[in-house]
Image (cartoon, rainbow, N blue to C red):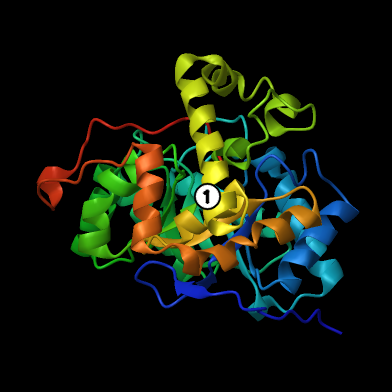
Amino acid sequence: MSFVYETKGMPFRRLGPSGLRVPLFSLGAWLTYGATVVGDPVKECIKTALEHGINMFDTAEGYAEGKAELEMGRVFKELDVKRTDIIVSTKIFWGGKGPNDTGLSRKHIIEGTKKCLERLQLDYVDVIFAHRPDHSVPMEEIVRAFNFVIDQGWAFYWATSEWSAHEIEEAYHVASKLGLIAPIAEQCQHNMFHRERPEKEYAPLYKNYSIGTTVWSGLARGLLTGKYNNGIPSDSRFAVHADFFKTRLEKLQSEEGQREIEKVKQLSEFAEKELGCGVQHLALAWLAVNPNTSTVILGASKPEQIVDNLKALDVIPKLTPEVLEKIEHILENKPTPWTTYGRASLDTSVRFNPTFI
């Protein structure tokens, strides 16, 4: 008997300009499944997500060297989830150590996609992401390769992750010139402390192409939960993955990092007194009310974390223009708007962050 899930009031939005409906909150595998979380705990997290209306699951070939996809694929089989009831996305870029096992060559996009499907035990994924831009490969080759994947039925759509606005714009122009399918979404880092790219650099893309975002690090890697207000908890991501987050830990100890901690404390007080919620719920709801956000990817190593994060749904209606303005007064980091729209306004100097997610 197939596992049956209920939406439980979960809102769904179109993913960018496509007809694909995705849940406002989805579940991702970065730094958890296949790495620090394996076996039954993965199953319980995915089962809990489904029970609470989350039916979109995001992973990548580079997560835990492919083990994240193996864990997710196993759980989908064990839960006997009906394929048409779930949305699965994965990402191509870091597939191995060989010269053709990384990047966005036609060879790696095609071979990497096939390997992803094998690990996931699926015939297709709903969305395949280019996990980073590849400046060594012509854009025409990249666009043609992802279109080939779609033509084979291995994916329904393709998208980008941490591409610059200029690079996404180029992909659109190549696709238009060749009569091919363009990317429908961008998977970007977006949170209260990381706003310039998603809110300013991508502004012309929202206007010209209606792309949507699948947001990662909505809680600033846990900073916006308040857990780091008084130090580094031993069970936190910063402690468990200390080497990986070395740069972020150094920033946390800096003057800038301490200012962010003070902002979190102010936001926590505001969330509790004015909205009756935790700062993490406020941070997630703040992302969700952004009209360009298609889905916010949650990370969870325990089922109860998923349930707690979804309390953000109750906060969304409370974020009136007046409340949002008060939040801006606390943050003091709202990006200045572009003076013009279109290609001329794209900042080509902004490069991608090589730390993958």
Q: Residue at x 64, y 24 (%)?
A: 244
- Judge whether residue 293 can be spotted in this image: yes
Could you say which is closer to the camera, residue 335 or residue 79?
Answer: 335
**Residue 8 x %, y %:** 67, 78
Q: Secondary structure at mark 1?
A: helix
Left or right position of 282 against 32: left
For label 1, the crowd category at 10 Å Cα-Cα, with few meaning under 14, some 14 to 19 and many 20 or more, is many
Q: Residue furthest front?
A: 273
Q: Residue furthest bottom?
A: 1
Q: Residue at x 70, y 44 (%)?
A: 66
Could you say which is closer to the camera, residue 215 or residue 111?
Answer: 215
Q: Amino acid at mark 1?
A: Ala
Could you say which is closer to the camera, residue 311 or residue 109?
Answer: 311
Location of the N terminus by quadrant is: bottom right
Left or right position of 157 against 206: right
Q: Residue at x 84, y 60 (%)?
A: 44
Numbered label tally: 1
**Residue 255 x %, y %:** 47, 15
Considering only vertical position in the picture, is 262 above or below 79? above
Could you say which is closer to the camera, residue 74 or residue 19?
Answer: 19
Considering only vertical position in the picture, is 95 above or below 272? above
Q: Residue at x 59, y 61 (%)?
A: 312
Considering only vertical position in the picture, is 232 above or below 86? above
- Judge whether residue 133 can be spotted in this image: no
Location of the C terminus by quadrant is: top right
**Mark 1 highlights which residue?**
283
Left or right position of 239 against 338: right
